């Protein structure tokens, strides 16, 4: 089956939201063409596969639906269109068995994206979806047709409906550069400014710490900021701190740094050991061991953790066991800046929901929006892909209901 020259629906954007919309639309019998400005599909999806491809999360749906901050109430009905169980069944239907990791995150057993993406594209081709790569959407021409810059020059198309799934503004080199914002703003849509999400933070490390420990992992630490907490791993980067445990608090930290020019993140280097237990361990005879050797043996701190402890509390660490234990359990690290969109895993901001009727662009009939173009953000943990898939499904169903 081959899609006609003018499809029923043009899907602009070949990432998870766009491809999922194309699957639902073509499955309902509509002809579909997917337009993607990059040479290949799913580039950011493949990048996510380098970390194992965290598809979704196994936690209770009620808890999952609360992970989207200020947009949680709005997104809830969209998430219900394609819940985690649906996503898992879909992946397994493409021959990709999944498993739940110790943190509750769901991954394909292959721990990469390429097998899933290949099977997915093959299914879409079987359903007659046409792919138009190297096609950069430039908006609408004077007649209202969609306009694309292609290797063969400017091309236009007038589908019955359009789904925009152009992504946010992070990882521009993979295709999502946020250039669409100006095009929609010209049509009267309100686009919230893009801001980095799931991102690292600047710390004024000493030259010694940076030289010795840049790139060193911080395993199984606890973080807290103004009552919010997270557990997991982080990385002492040359510029500061990054990693999953940091990203879980990154929205609040970003807002604080932007408002006050700094934020103090408290690091618990031994979250599984109580302060009393640490005090008892550090009260044993030290003998002639240096403080660093003693911390490695008694508190089981790694060299980078000892270095971070000194960064937080100063070179002259307390020697009293109770004070030293307290220092290990609460090491304050001052964050002085936020890394930019070019280093962010995802972006906050985007098309505001009050510019939409459901997922249809207000004032532009037949144009629907899905994925990270929308003004929502979520921590890592499978929540980003879950919402991209779900909004792609919801937008496609709205099109089918209207035009199918």
Image: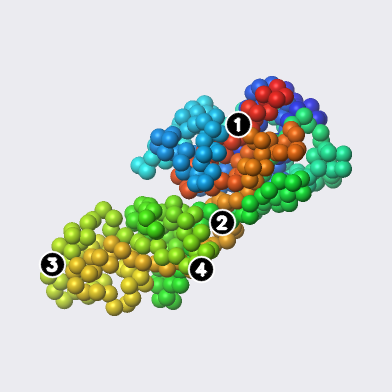
Secondary structure at badge 3 equals: loop
Question: Which mark is on residue 53?
Answer: none
| Image x and y of residue 332, in percent | 36, 66
Q: CA distance from mark 2 to mark 1?
A: 26 Å
Marks 1 and 3, how far apart in space?
61 Å
Labels 1, 3: front one:
1
**Residue beneath label 2, please?**
196
C-alpha gap between disc 3 and disc 4: 42 Å
Residue at the image point whose x is 40% and y is 35% from the top: 60
Where does the image place residue 383, in percent across and percent down from the top left?
Answer: 49, 42
Q: Secondary structure at mark 4?
A: loop
SS for callout 2: strand
**Between disc 2 and disc 1, whose residue precedes?**
2
Q: Nearer the viewer, mark 3 or mark 2?
A: 2
Q: Does 246 sit above or below residue 54?
A: below
Residue at the left extreme of this rendering:
285
- Residue identifier under label 1: 394
Badge 3 density bin: few <14, some 14–19, many ≥20, Cα 10 Å: few
Q: Quadrant of residue 135?
A: top right
Front one among 257 and 322? 257
First in residue order: circle 2 vs circle 4 = 2
Query: Which residue occupies the foreground of this view, 166 or 63?
Result: 63
Q: Which mark is residue 284?
A: 3
Quadrant for the N terminus, please: top right
Residue at the image position 64 percent from the left and 34 percent from the top: 358
- Mark 1 and mark 3 lie on one chain; the one further toward the N terminus is 3
First-in-chain label (3 vs 2): 2
Quadrant in which the C terminus appears: top right
Is residue 178 shown above or below 164?
A: below
For disc 1, the neighbor class at 10 Å (few under 14, some 14 to 19, many from 20) is many
Residue 261, label in figure: 4
């Amino acid at each position: 089956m081959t899609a006609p020259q003018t499809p029923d629906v043009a899907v602009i954007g070949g990432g998870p939201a766009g491809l999922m919309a194309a699957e639902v639309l073509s499955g309902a019998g509509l002809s579909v063409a997917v337009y993607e400005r990059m040479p290949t599909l799913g580039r950011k999806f493949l990048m996510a596969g380098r970390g194992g491809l965290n598809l979704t999360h196994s936690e209770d749906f009620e808890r999952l639906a609360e992970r989207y901050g200020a947009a949680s109430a709005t997104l809830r009905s969209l998430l219900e269109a394609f819940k985690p169980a649906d996503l898992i069944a879909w992946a397994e239907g493409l021959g990709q068995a999944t498993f739940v990791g110790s943190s509750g995150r769901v991954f394909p057993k292959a721990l990469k994206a390429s097998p899933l993406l290949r099977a997915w594209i093959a299914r879409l081709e079987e359903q007659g979806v046409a792919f138009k790569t190297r096609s950069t959407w430039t908006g609408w021409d004077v007649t209202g047709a969609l306009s694309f810059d292609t290797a063969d020059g400017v091309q236009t198309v007038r589908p019955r409906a359009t789904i925009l799934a152009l992504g946010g503004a992070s990882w521009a080199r993979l295709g999502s550069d946020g250039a669409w914002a100006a095009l929609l703003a010209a049509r009267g849509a309100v686009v919230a400014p893009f801001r980095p999400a799931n991102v690292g933070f600047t710390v004024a490390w000493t030259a010694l710490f940076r030289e010795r420990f840049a790139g060193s992992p911080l395993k199984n630490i606890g973080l807290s900021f103004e009552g919010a907490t997270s557990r997991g791993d982080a990385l002492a980067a040359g510029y500061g701190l990054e990693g999953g445990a940091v990203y879980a608090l990154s929205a609040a930290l970003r807002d604080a740094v932007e408002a006050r020019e700094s934020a103090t993140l408290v690091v618990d280097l031994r979250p599984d050991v109580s302060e009393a237990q640490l005090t008892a361990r550090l009260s044993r005879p030290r003998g002639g061991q240096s403080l660093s050797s003693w911390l490695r043996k008694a508190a089981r701190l790694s060299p980078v953790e000892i270095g971070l402890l000194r960064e937080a509390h100063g070179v002259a660490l307390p020697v009293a066991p109770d004070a030293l234990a307290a220092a290990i359990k609460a090491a304050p690290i001052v964050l002085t800046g936020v890394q930019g969109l070019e280093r962010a895993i995802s972006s906050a901001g985007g098309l505001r929901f009050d510019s939409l009727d459901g997922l249809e662009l207000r004032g532009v009939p037949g144009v629907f929006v899905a994925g990270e173009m929308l003004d929502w953000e979520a921590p890592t943990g499978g929540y980003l892909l879950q919402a991209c898939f779900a909004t792609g499904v919801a937008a496609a169903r709205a099109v089918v209901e209207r035009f199918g």
